[in-house]
Image (tube, grey):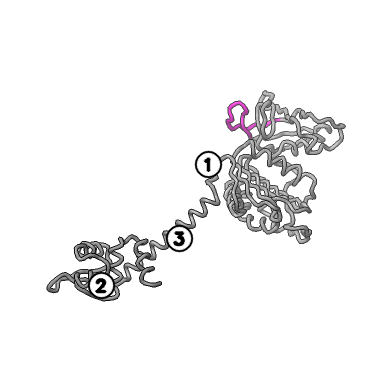
Amino acid sequence: MDTAELRTALRNAGLSQYQSEAYVALLQLGAASATELADACAVPTARIYDVLRDLESKGYIETYEQDNLHARACDPKSVMEALKSRAAQLDEAAGEIESRWEEPAVDRHMLSIVKRFETVFNRTKELIRDAKSEVQLSATPEQFEALRPSLMEAYENGALIKVSLHPEHEEEITDVDEAQFRGAASEVRHRTLPTPFVAIIDRTGACFAPHADSVNQYGVLVDDYTLTYVFHWYFQTALWEVWDVVYSAQTTEPPIAYTDIRHFVQDVEPLLQDGKRVITHVDGVETDNREPVEVVGELTDIHYTAVSAPKDTLSFSELAGQVCLTVESEGETLTIGGWGALLEEIEANRITIESIS
């Protein structure tokens, strides 16, 4: 760095033009009288005394009397520390500017479009860690492994976790170790085709990014109940329903928990047709005021708009219309709907089969 560049750097650090001129000259002279210093730099003699007092107050120099006013540069250690601190602050500010340019404040928007996959992935980690009810995740094995600590937290909190595992490119996933899923997933299915990254958490948050080989790279962050429902249907129909199960922690004996009313109906309708008595525990909200509610009672009827022979196993798509449960609880007959319920009295967040007899 030459002398001119040093003076410019000092001005950027907060010194005035005259202050930087005088300080650089004094560094070269070591010590000098005020008039000698004025002659050695571009500071007018009439201004040199004010400039020296200002530099002394900033800790750059010290003045002393020797027939007339003299000055010498202070030990530069404190000056260097101040400059390094300022440089670090500016570097941090530059990073923050870049971050804010690339990553909008997602907590203020129902829908945010971002540029980096890392933004989507980090947001997914945050949402999963706080999940209490359900996580639906479409990820590669490497992405699952990176998210596993967050998934384990959600699993420990009682969330049901569905994972659709897909390859990064076109190669098959051949090494599936069930041990890696224990405590981090309720059920895992294997989709054989490369797929976008998708995460749906507790019905209000969704994170999406196209496959890494897609032409356009971006991310979508959703913080909205209705928009998240769209991603839920994409996950269920394209990434979940038709693919093979490779791991399941779900028990076949009560209590058996469901977060999706349609999967519940697929399993329970044959039981009702066989005359079984099914006791259910429903956690949800009242549809008219969104207040939390719990119901325990006997499932007495299932209504859905699909047409199917009595012994058929209904597909998820056949149950795409209205699905309604009727539960008798403490002398009341209550109607239970699923995600987005409007016509029923209760929207179920979780349905648990407590007993079958």
* Real-space CA distance between mark 3 and mark 2, rounded to the nearest whole angstrom: 34 Å
Q: Quadrant of the N terminus?
A: bottom left
Magenta span: 284-297
Q: Position of residue 350 (x, y in %)?
A: 67, 38
Q: Earlier in the sequence, mark 1 or mark 2?
A: 2
Image location of residue 3, percent across then percent down: 36, 71
Residue found 23% across the figure and 65% down from its top: 44
Q: Earlier in the sequence, mark 1 or mark 3?
A: 3
| 3 or 2: mark nearer the eye | 2
Q: 164 left or right of 110?
A: right
Give the position of the C terminus as an image quadrant.
Answer: top right
Q: Secondary structure at mark 1?
A: helix
The three-letter code of the residue at mark 1 reads: Arg
**In the foreground, 132 or 104:** 104
Residue marked by disc 2: 40
Q: Residues within 10 Å of mark 3 (few under 14, many from 20)?
A: few
SS at mark 3 in the image: helix
Residue 116: tell me if it is visible. yes
Give the SS element for disc 2: helix
For the residue marked with disc 2, what is the amino acid?
Ala
Q: Amino acid at mark 3?
A: Asp
The residue pinned by badge 1 equals: 108
Numbered tag placed on residue 91 in the rendering: 3
